[in-house]
Image (tube, rainbow, N blue to C red):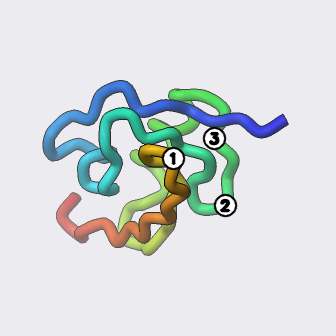
Amino acid sequence: GPTAVTVLEVSPGGPADTAGLQTGDIVLDFDGHPIVSVDDLHRLLTEDIAGRETSVTVIRRADVKTLALTPSEDA
């Protein structure tokens, strides 16, 4: 079945914060990759988003949102 990871902590200025994630968001998908563990999320946040636009799909307070990410070049 579908898998998801709940964001438990967002460090200010960290990858999740830069991505626009909020504590309590339930991450379903990152750039087309289903997220099955926190390790998946962290790996994708730190590796895949350098210098290119991606998107992340989350459930936030019962609404499904797709956030577009455009990481800054100096990240």
Seen at 34% across and 48% down, the residue is: 21
> Which of label 2 and label 1 is nearer to you?
1
- Answer few, some or many: residues within 10 Å of disc 1's Cα (few below 14, many 20 plus, some between 14 and 19): few
Seen at 54% across and 57% down, the residue is: 64
- Answer few, some or many: residues within 10 Å of disc 3's Cα (few below 14, many 20 plus, some between 14 and 19): many
Q: Which quarter of the figure has residue 5?
A: top right
Find disc 3 in the rendering and name its residue: 35
Counting residues from the N terminus, which is met first, the one under dot 3 or under dot 1? 3
Comparing 17 with 62, the one in front is 62
- Answer few, some or many: residues within 10 Å of disc 2's Cα (few below 14, many 20 plus, some between 14 and 19): few
Find disc 2 in the rendering and name its residue: 32
Left of 4 or right of it: where is 7? Answer: left
Q: Which amino acid does label 3 sit on?
A: Ile
Q: Distance between the residues labelled 3 and 1?
A: 18 Å
Q: Which quarter of the figure has residue 9?
A: top left
Q: Position of residue 41 (x, y in %)?
A: 51, 39
Q: Does residue 59 lie above or below 53 as drawn?
A: above
Q: Quadrant of the C terminus?
A: bottom left
Seen at 43% across and 44% down, the residue is: 61
Find disc 1 in the rendering and name its residue: 62
Say what secondary structure mark 2 lies in.
loop
Counting residues from the N terminus, which is met first, the one under dot 2 or under dot 1? 2
Say what secondary structure mark 3 lies in.
loop
